[in-house]
């Protein structure tokens, strides 16, 4: 791929090559589902062109509706079809109607939650007159099918990526080097940290069917919080690095979220591309905070509930989103009442709030990871010391390794809270950078990594 | 349009340091494992099983197939079998796994018209215990990527590096150290490296298991139960 990208070929040829590479990358999982990618691409490109050429509000709304129905319809069918059918069956059963549907067998296309949101943001931006449609189908198709962000984001905005396709892009030596280092960091996070250290502990605790001792329950949840960060941030860091090595810039998706002070701060640091998408296309159009306090809380809850369901077709994800909505609402209410006090700007208050934020976020991770509410309740019963009779499960090694690594991770987030990784790298000697780089490569090799997929591939 | 900031680092120098350091560390790591008797071998992975299983649907449906647990897997000599029978059997036995899932899998496949030799280790066969059951379940959905990864690894990496063995993975080694036991949590020492595998899943006992009695019967570390029985 690099050989073609840096060969003396025309820019259009290179873009076609990148597009084909994206489709091959996607088809390597399941070839027929590339058709969905094409469908979303072609329909939204056409709808956006027509939107830009139409002035009357009625037809414009109709065109937008076509795009929304197609994208959300595809997403609903593949992602929520089975969930809706199961809940419908359960609902009518409560009314005494025994409805037995054929067993559904719907395969969730990888990345559908991501690329449907990206194409939707394109038509929405054109409808809201925030952007002009691109005249080139190739550029739009490449925006959708650009392989680094295709299957698990970041949810890139068309205004950020499409202009980069206008002229030939090639990475300078420094961009290429930084891109390779970012890819190494991403792989290290995934293979060594997420899969090597945290997943064995998290899986053991969440798959237990008995009540666990509080220490084990907390360790498992903390391990999952670290696993999901390292897994997802590892993927997006690799994606950002791969893009940079080809000369393209993609925005950060994480900014050391476990050093967040408060839940608004958390959502400015966690899965940034999704939280800003929800803010710009859901929260603000619903009115944001411009229609009074009561409506603000409704808008916050609606946005976070839908953010929860975006992750998966399960009531546990709805609860996860709902909890974050409650946290944000409570924070807003308390900040309005007590936020002016100088105490909240002291170091001890900031540390306390940060620990509280981290703890409360971990409570929500229980619902995110648990397969059932019973499992979640069992863990929380132990974590909140409601029942302390649970038995220990984790060996000394698993307990110690997880807690040590989580401490290291949260400590790193704290140190980097107000820093940028590139700035730290710039202040470090190249020999030290090289040593860290070499150590990461070595650890990746000897960890040996299994074939576990990235967690966010399932969303 | 967003432009990602790039640090003014001498990446050429950093890259050279990284490659040299990684090479030195890998060399030392590999040397250690060669020193304890390990040799490059194919990893006995689920994807490897799937590739062998696929042979039945790619023109070898009339082959002799071996299924069962480790007593059918370890030290069956396909070369001798070939001398006697004229064809090498397809090795689909899975350690610690009842033959029943594989039996059902092949019975449901009309492409299979050959002979099946079924190894029966009674406690495993009749209990349905399937330590490697996932290999059978996942074989039908092996993706193009997984297939390509398996082939790249078994042809380019595994023939070169002896440390590429799941029993030598960093965190597996760490977990198997003699850590203090936590009250109420009993850790069975998992069986360590037992065998070496070839690309066609011909598997033989690792020499050290045969010749090193201490390795074969390690003394129990402080307070930990050892698994007295090897996985079949």
Image: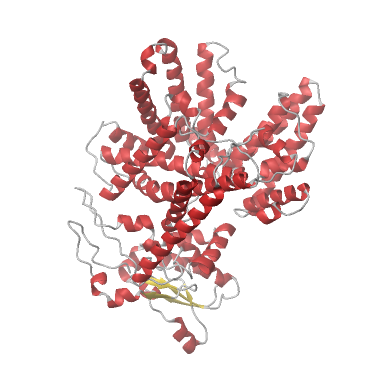
Q: Position of residue B16 (x, y in %)?
A: 52, 55
Q: Where is residue A86 in the image (x, y as percent from the top left)?
A: 51, 39
Quarter assignment of residue A121: top right
**Residue situated in front as seen by the camera: B90 or A438:** A438
Q: Which residue is drawn at 54% across and 10% down?
A: A292
**Residue situated in front as seen by the camera: B124 or A405:** A405
Quadrant of image for the N terminus of chain A: bottom right
Q: Is residue A221 above or below residue A339?
A: below
Residue B130 seen from this side: no
Quadrant of image for the C terminus of chain A: top right
Quarter assignment of residue A43: top right
Q: Residue at x 21, y 51 (%)?
A: B181
Q: Which residue lies furthest to the left in this view?
A: B223
Q: Position of residue A286 (x, y in %)?
A: 60, 19
Residue A319 seen from this side: yes
Decide if residue A27 is on the left or right side of residue A213: right
The colour scheme of the drawn protein is secondary structure
**Residue situated in front as seen by the camera: A411 or B120:** A411
Q: In this view, does A210 lie above or below A27?
A: above
Q: Residue at x 23, y 35 (%)?
A: A388
Q: Where is residue B51 in the image (x, y as percent from the top left)?
A: 53, 67
Q: How many labels does the image show?
A: 0
């Amino acid at each position: 791929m690099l050989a073609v990208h840096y060969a003396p070929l025309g820019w259009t040829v290179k873009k076609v090559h990148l597009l084909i590479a994206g489709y091959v990358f996607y088809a390597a999982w399941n070839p027929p589902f590339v058709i969905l990618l094409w469908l979303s691409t072609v329909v939204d490109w056409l709808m956006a062109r027509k939107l830009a050429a139409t002035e009357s509000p009625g037809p414009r709304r109709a065109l937008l509706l076509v795009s929304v129905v197609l994208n959300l319809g595809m997403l609903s069918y593949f992602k929520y079809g089975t969930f809706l059918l199961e809940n419908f069956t359960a609902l009518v059963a409560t009314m005494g109607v025994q409805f037995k549907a054929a067993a559904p067998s719907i395969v969730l296309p990888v990345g559908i939650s991501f690329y449907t949101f990206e194409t939707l943001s394109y038509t929405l931006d054109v409808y809201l007159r925030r952007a002009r449609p691109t005249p080139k189908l190739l550029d739009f198709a490449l925006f959708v099918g650009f392989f680094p962000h295709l299957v698990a984001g970041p949810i890139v905005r068309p205004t950020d990526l499409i202009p980069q396709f206008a002229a030939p892009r090639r990475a300078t030596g420094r961009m290429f080097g930084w891109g390779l280092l970012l890819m190494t960091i991403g792989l290290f996070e995934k293979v060594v940290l997420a899969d090597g250290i945290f997943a064995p502990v998290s899986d053991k605790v969440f798959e237990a069917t008995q009540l666990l001792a509080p220490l084990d329950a907390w360790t498992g949840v903390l391990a999952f919080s670290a696993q999901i960060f390292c897994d997802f941030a590892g993927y997006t860091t690799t994606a950002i690095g791969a893009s940079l090595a080809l000369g393209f810039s993609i925005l950060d998706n994480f900014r050391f979220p476990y050093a967040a002070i408060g839940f608004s701060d958390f959502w400015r640091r966690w899965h940034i591309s999704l939280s800003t998408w929800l803010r710009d296309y859901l929260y603000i159009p619903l009115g944001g905070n411009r229609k009074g306090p009561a409506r603000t809380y409704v808008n916050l809850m609606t946005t976070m509930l839908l953010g929860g369901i975006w992750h998966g077709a399960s009531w546990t994800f709805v609860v996860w989103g709902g909890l974050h909505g409650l946290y944000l609402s409570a924070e807003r209410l308390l900040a309005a009442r007590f936020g002016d006090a100088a105490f909240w700007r002291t170091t001890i208050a900031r540390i306390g709030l940060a620990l509280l934020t981290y703890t409360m976020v971990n409570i929500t991770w229980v619902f995110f990871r648990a397969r059932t509410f019973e499992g979640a309740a069992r863990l929380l019963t132990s974590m909140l010391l409601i029942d302390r009779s649970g038995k220990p499960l984790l060996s000394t090694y698993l307990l110690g390794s997880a807690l040590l690594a989580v401490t290291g991770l949260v400590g790193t987030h704290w140190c980097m809270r107000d820093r940028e990784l590139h700035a730290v790298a710039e202040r470090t000697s190249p020999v030290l950078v090289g040593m860290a780089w070499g150590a990461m490569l070595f650890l990746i090799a000897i960890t040996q990594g299994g074939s576990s997929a990235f967690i966010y591939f399932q969303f | 349009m967003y432009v990602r900031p790039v640090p003014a680092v001498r990446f050429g120098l950093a890259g050279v340091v990284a490659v040299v350091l990684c090479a030195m560390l890998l060399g030392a790591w590999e040397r250690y494992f060669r020193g304890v008797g390990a040799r490059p071998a194919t990893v006995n992975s689920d994807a490897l099983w799937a590739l062998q299983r696929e042979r039945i649907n790619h023109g070898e449906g009339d082959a002799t197939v071996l299924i069962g647990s480790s007593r059918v897997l370890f030290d069956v000599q396909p070369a001798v079998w070939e001398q006697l029978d004229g064809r090498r059997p397809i090795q689909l036995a899975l350690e610690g796994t009842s033959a029943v899932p594989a039996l059902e899998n092949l019975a449901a496949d009309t492409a299979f018209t050959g002979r099946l030799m079924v190894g029966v280790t009674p406690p495993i066969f009749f209990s349905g215990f399937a330590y490697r059951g996932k290999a059978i379940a996942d074989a039908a959905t092996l993706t193009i990527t997984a297939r390509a990864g398996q082939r790249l690894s078994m042809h380019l990496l595994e023939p070169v590096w002896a440390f590429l063995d799941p029993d030598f993975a960093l965190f597996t080694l760490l977990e198997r150290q003699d850590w203090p036991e936590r009250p109420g949590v009993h850790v069975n020492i998992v069986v360590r490296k037992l065998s070496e595998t070839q690309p066609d899943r011909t598997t033989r006992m690792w020499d050290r298991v045969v010749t090193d009695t201490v390795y074969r019967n390690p003394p129990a570390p402080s307070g930990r139960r050892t698994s007295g029985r090897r996985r079949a």
